[in-house]
């Protein structure tokens, strides 16, 4: 149980960033600045590359929000005396610059690792933001985690088994958070 609690202490900046970014994409500012990463372009098959839901402002906002949550969470860990539970600090010290860098890497990898899934879904005619079966539902919940946990794997040198355990725990958490956001009408689909 202590290990799982430590994993949540470590994952919390990304969990918070994901929630805050989902709230941000509902704002008028987001809607005004919304521009698809693929620029509306299609491939030879006539299908969009990523679709309308992968936007530059969403990509940038996830990085900025991840930096802010990582820095704030690092300060809270220090104040609460729980730094020892956060695997981000197993090798490197809890410093503002380190937290900002890890936050930026978390945000960028989160967004980058969502793109292949969006690309595949466009090829097989799944609408942006939709899921057609259980396989894609699971992939939608864990695609970004592979990137985020890669950053944790590199910065904290966690063992491979723990990398996959983080993906499992993170996927379960992602589903739970999405259900809450759906019920609060912040998220349109599950």
Image: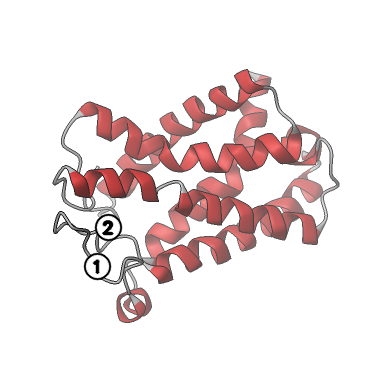
Residue under label 1, please give it.
41
Q: Is label 2 in a helix, a strand or a loop? A: loop
N-terminal of the pair, mark 1 or mark 2, is: 1
Which quadrant: the C terminus? top left
Q: Position of residue 157 (x, y in %)?
A: 74, 31
**Mark 2 Cα within 10 Å, few/some/many (few <14, many 20+)?**
many
Q: Residue furthest front?
A: 44
Label 1, label 2: how many angstroms apart (C-alpha)?
7 Å
Please count the marks in the image. Answer: 2
Left or right of residue 83: residue 11? left
Say left or right for 172 vs 16: left
Residue 42 pos. (x, y %): 21, 63
Mark 1 touching mark 2, by CB under 8 A? yes
Query: Percent position (x, y) of residue 56?
Result: 41, 69
Label 1 Cα neighbours within 10 Å, binned few <14 / some 14-19 / many ≥20: few
Q: Residue at x 51, y 37 (%)?
A: 146
Image coordinates of residue 58 in percent, x first then y, are: 41, 65
Above or below, comparing residue 27 to residue 68 in the picture: below
| Residue to which mark 2 is pinned | 49
């Amino acid at each position: 149980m202590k290990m799982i609690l430590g994993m949540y202490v470590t994952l919390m900046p990304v969990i918070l960033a994901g929630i805050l970014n989902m709230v941000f994409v509902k704002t008028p500012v987001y809607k005004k600045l919304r521009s698809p990463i693929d620029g509306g372009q299609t491939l030879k098959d006539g299908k969009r590359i990523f679709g309308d839901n992968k936007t530059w402002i969403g990509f940038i906002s996830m990085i900025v929000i991840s930096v802010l949550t990582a820095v704030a969470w690092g300060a809270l860990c220090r104040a609460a005396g729980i730094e020892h539970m956060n695997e981000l600090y197993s090798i490197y010290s809890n410093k503002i610059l380190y937290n900002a860098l890890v936050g930026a890497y978390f945000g960028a990898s989160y967004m980058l690792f969502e793109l292949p899934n969006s690309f595949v879904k466009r090829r097989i005619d799944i609408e942006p933001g939709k899921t057609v079966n259980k396989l894609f539902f699971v992939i939608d919940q864990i695609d970004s985690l592979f990137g985020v946990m890669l950053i944790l794997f590199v910065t904290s040198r966690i063992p491979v088994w723990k990398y996959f355990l983080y993906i499992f725990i993170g996927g379960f958490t992602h589903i739970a958070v999405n259900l809450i956001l759906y019920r609060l009408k912040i998220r349109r689909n599950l």
